[in-house]
Amino acid sequence: MRRNIGLAVPLAALALLTACGGYTQDTCTLIDTPAGFRVAVHPELANSVADATLTACWDGTCRKRTLQLDTWPKEPATPGNPVMTTESATATEPPAARAPQNPEPSLPWPGFVVIRDLPSSKPIQVTLVFKNQRGATVLDRQISTTTPQPTYSNGRNCSPDGSQVRLTVTREGTLIPR
């Protein structure tokens, strides 16, 4: 019996120490979010674009980057096609009624342009130009003032990461900051 008590005391002390000094929610890691623009384009418009550029200007300097758009699948999303959807169909919702779900893309990210020195909380001017297969301009839109916001991949208690701007381009070609 003495043997069991002898082990129980150190084990209880160890459990108490680990409970007090364990993992916290405020742990900051080396994970970082890149600075840049996330651009969501309506699928019909995105599928007609062969070349896309984004130009960002602030403090008298402009940075022009090529934008790789998401190419949406031509076939409908179905429960049997897991690449195109992350959800299973329900009895009340037929597969054809659901919007396609694309997994997070890997590098280079479709719909994302990296601009490492994008300022945080400073107004910038953004221009998007889309061209079709023949080289004709199908979209040339500009937002005169949009403000990048810092991102926090480790939470608000850690240092901010790269600043980002989110833009949406509608089917009609309207450019909307989000």
Image: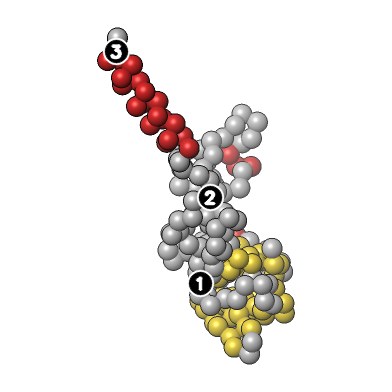
What's the CA distance linking mark 1 and mark 2? Answer: 27 Å
Which residue shows up at 52% across the image and 55% down it? 154
**Disc 3 residue type?**
Arg
Query: Is residue 52 or residue 162 the one in the foreground?
Result: 162
Which residue shows up at 53% across the image and 46% down it? 25
**Disc 2 residue type?**
Asp
Where is residue 111 shown, x and y percent of the image? Answer: 54, 65
**Residue 75 visible in the picture:** no
Where is residue 35 shown, x and y percent of the image? Answer: 54, 69
Image quadrant assignment for residue 172: bottom right
Q: Secondary structure at mark 3?
A: helix
The quarter of the rendered structure image containing the N terminus is: top left
Which residue shows up at 55% across the image and 58% down it? 158
Q: Which mark is residue 2?
A: 3
Where is residue 27 shown, x and y percent of the image? Answer: 49, 51
CB contact under 8 Å: marks 3 and 2: no
The answer to whether residue 88 is above or below residue 107 is above
| Mark before the other along the chain sequence, 1 or 3 | 3
Residue matched to label 1: 114
Residue matched to label 2: 26
The answer to whether residue 27 is above or below residue 117 is above
| Mark before the other along the chain sequence, 3 or 2 | 3
The quarter of the rendered structure image containing the C terminus is: bottom right
**Disc 1 residue type?**
Val
Crowd around label 1: few <14 · some 14–19 · many ≥20 (10 Å): some
What's the CA distance linking mark 1 and mark 3? Answer: 65 Å
| Mark before the other along the chain sequence, 1 or 2 | 2
Q: Secondary structure at mark 2?
A: loop
Q: Secondary structure at mark 1?
A: strand
